[in-house]
Image: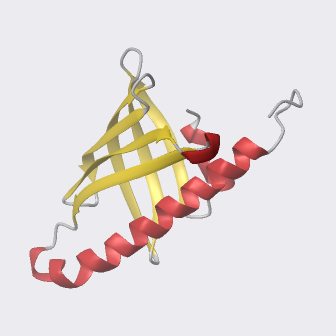
Amino acid sequence: MDVESYPECMDSVEAVSVVARRGAGHRTTAWSVRLQGSVLRWTEDEVIDASARRFDFRQVSGDLGAFAGHWGVRPGPGGGSTVSLHVDFDIGIPLLADMLNPVAADALRENAAQMLAALQARLAAPGEDGAR
């Protein structure tokens, strides 16, 4: 998964870099993402289980109080795929949580939809060798 190219195809992603790799399917990435007019930065540990079609992530440092979840892919109807995203997060500002958490949840949904649309467009475009 080439996360470092995400800024090229996703407007909300300013930067992503892989900062460490720890064996097959384990890495740490640093993110900078625009969300509702603010720039959020964090570093996350990731576990990619290709056979289970699952990608788990957990913030280890950053702007949010907590941020963890997983992406999952399963076969969908008609030969397609169904993608699911589960995120648990905490803004980290208890007095504003009731006001900010719903706004952040909506922004995360919008950002995830943008990521999926960008990935779908990349998959639909011919590669350098002309293959899809």
Q: Residue furthest front?
A: 78
Q: Nearer the viewer, residue 111 or 11?
A: 111
Where does residue 106 sit, x and y in percent of width and height?
A: 38, 74
- Give the image quarter of residue 60: top left
Where does residue 12 sit, x and y in percent of width and height?
A: 55, 64
Q: Residue furthest bottom?
A: 99
Asked if residue 68 lies left or right of residue 52, the reply is: left
Q: Nearer the viewer, residue 88 or 35?
A: 88
Question: Which residue occupies 47% across, 48% down?
Answer: 83
Where does residue 62 sit, x and y in percent of width and height?
A: 28, 53
Question: Which residue occupies 44% across, 77% down?
Answer: 36
91, above or below 4, in the image:
below
Where does residue 129 sit, x and y in percent of width and height?
A: 87, 26
Would residue 39 be seen by someone viewing this image from the given angle?
no
Would residue 98 be seen by someone viewing this image from the given angle?
yes
Quadrant holding the C terminus: top right
Quadrant holding the N terminus: top right
Asked if residue 44 lies left or right of residue 88, the reply is: right
Q: How many marks?
A: 0
16, above or below 107, in the image:
above
- Give the image quarter of residue 11: bottom right
Question: Which residue occupies 55% across, 55% down?
Answer: 115
3, above or below 131, in the image:
below
Asked if residue 124 lies left or right of residue 51, the reply is: right
Q: Residue furthest top?
A: 23
